[in-house]
Image (spheres, helix red, strand yellow):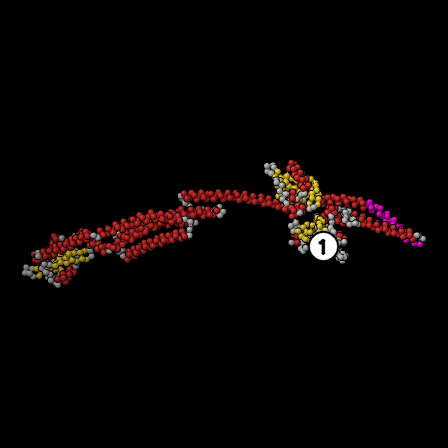
Amino acid sequence: MHDELQPRRKFTLVLLLILVPILFLLGWSQASLNLSFLQPASARATILLIAISVVIFLAFVIFALILTRILLKLYFERSKQQFGAHFKIKMLAAFLGLSVVPVCVLFIFANGLLNRSIDKWFGIPFDTVRRDASEIFHQVEAQAEQRTLHDTVHLAEHEELQRDLAAGSRARVEAVLARTARDLSLDLALCFDAHGEILAQTGQMGPDPAEVGRLFSQMMNGRLPESGASTRWAGGNLELFLAASPVLGQEGEHLGSVVIGRQLPTNIRKMAGEIQREAGKYDELSRERRAVKRIYLWILSLLTLLILFAATWFALFLSKQVTVPIGALAEATHEVSRGNLGYRVTVRSGDELGSLIESFNEMTSQLEANRRVIEQAAKDLREAHLELEEHARLVEVILQNIPTGVVSLDRQGQITQVNSTMERMFGAEKVKNARSLGELLVPDDLREVSRLFRRAARQGSITRQMDLEMNGRRVPIALTISSIRAPRGTVGGMLLVIEDLTEVLRAQKAMAWQEVAQRIAHEIKNPLTPIQLSTDRIRRLIERAGSVAVSQDLADAVSESVTLVGREIESLKQLVDEFSSLARFPASRPVPAQINHIVEAAFHVFEGRLDGVSLQCDLARDLPPVQADPEQLRRAIVNLIDNAAEAVEKSALRVISVRTALDAERDIVELIVADSGPGITAEAKEKLFLPFFSTKRRGTGLGLAIVSRIVSEHNGTIRVEENQPSGTRFVIELAVDRAAVLNAG
């Protein structure tokens, strides 16, 4: 935009510098000089000069308005604290300060000089010269007129003319007139007869003879005195002194009259005309002396205004040459400070400011290039950071979802990070408040772990299987300790991985018991068949021998023994079936299922069959589906409810509650079966899910082992807890089937 306006401003400035002196010279010459082309000789020339005067006046009015506008604009810029306003005011004050004093001194001096000069022009010597020149001219005219009259009288007294006129000889009269006109340097000579008719004439200058006769007849009432008469005639560019005298005969009779005409010398007439014109101008100027002074005063005022206008204009022009580039640089600096490094200063300047602008643009170009490099590096860094964050989130998710506990320590042994498994192992509240391992482990365990720390610092990593006390019970674990190396090779901390081996050992024991159960079932089943056959045979023989006399006591004893053997055989068969079920448990077929529906199906089994027991059901709504074999999971729930019913038989308060809930943070569904029975000891809790362990007098110890087997095949967990205020809680945790949830959504 500035580049487009710069040529226009230069053109306007040059045009003003040319037009202003021309207009001023025209006004000054029109007002003070007597130039011929400025003296209108026609209406068109007058209109032209009026138009020029109007243009000059309008030009100065426009200049005054422009100057006023500039000053007002500068005032408002200063009021609004616009950039460059103070500098413009300083420049304007400096130029006006340098211009006003000399201009005012020049104005006062020139005005006094002009006034004194004008007063001298119209002083007494000039008036005296003018009067003397006029008097001399009048005397010259009078002498010329007297000479012409004298020559006329002399011609009228010429005897030859009188004789020829009396004789009426026209030719001779013309000859006398021609000779006399030549001798006396006359411009015109006329001769009239006694009747006033033209008789002879010499010279072509002057008026018509008839007009001359009428002129003198009117002047003298038809009679000329003997001394003659004179007058002045002017026509066109010719002015003559005319003199007439009567021609008298010897007897005094009137023979006629003669008229001669003579004009002043050309140089005298020119000088006389110039003197008269200058005298008229002098008189006019003398009458308009004050007007002349006022005109020159206006000219000086206009010149002063023009100088001040030029100084103001030039000051503002120079200030713009500085403020416009500086303002553009300030605006560019503001844009750069806002982050717009692509901004460029488009103002052009041929001085040092131009070099500054070029340096600024070069600097912003380098900054923009550097920013692109930095932005690319930042982008790469962000991508790397995002990858690291993604990796960190992945590691965090893995840490929070792996079944092993993970805890990291710094060089001072302070806990820096733990996962959710550690909170489940040691208790969430205890882990959150702990700052070191000493607040989690008992002293004996802490000493053992510290010893392993020292070995891990030497070896880098170490793994040991040991027992740790967690939540008041000893738990078998596999502990792995790894040292975290700092960049300089020093130990920066420790990483502990704790794996709960309870389920592993339980599974190993279950596998061992399954093999034992297979062998026991095989060994028991082999003799049961012949025993069963033998008892059947004895029963049939007794029934057939009804007619044979047999001792009643013997018959009763045999019958009772057979019945007892049969009942025990059935009991042994049931035991063998349970062994077989444990050894050859069918594979589960998990499908997306609603756990609430499975719980309701298990509840139907016990409807109306638990006298005196309050069976409560609290099922959470809108639970997500889980992967489960509905039949096997129902069997496990039935087993838990049945065990709970047996546990509350001798309790004063017999309550069994089944509850489902969603743990959104861990993305699992919980199934809780609680009773109000006497509870289970800590030692029994550790063996509760092992085969052939039972707290009941006649229990086989296989029910909870089967339940644990079912839950494990569903990739879930089961644990036993104390119920409040009394009793036991069995908690089953199953993972949410995310695929089924997404398909349903």
Q: Is residue 697 left or right of residue 267?
A: right
- Location of residue 271 in the rendering, given as x and y in whole percent from the top left corner: 19, 52
Indicate whether residue 428 is drawn in magenta.
no
Residue at the far left in the pictured view: 251
Q: Is residue 1 left or right of residue 482?
A: left
In x, y percent, where is residue 364?
Answer: 47, 44
Q: How many marks?
A: 1
In the image: residue 351, left or right of residue 507: left
Residue 657 in view in this figure = yes
Q: Position of residue 560 (x, y in %)?
A: 87, 52
**Does 81 sit left or right of 678 as displayed?**
left
Q: For residue 201, say whether it is visible.
A: no
Circle 1 is placed at which residue position? 657
From the image, which quarter does the C terminus lie in? bottom right
Tell me which amino acid carries mark 1: Ser
Identify the residue at image location x=71%, y=48%.
Answer: 719
Q: Give the x, y percent position of residue 358.
A: 44, 43
Residue at (84, 46) in percent of width and height: 527
Farthest residue toward the bottom?
221
Which residue is located at x 13 percent, y 58 percent?
Answer: 230
Numbered disc 1: secondary structure: strand
Which region of the structure is painted magenta?
522-547
Pick whichever, 303 or 91, lies toward us: 91
Residue 535 among magenta residues: yes
Q: Residues within 10 Å of mark 1 (few under 14, many from 20)?
A: some
Front in this rendered view, residue 713 or 730:
730
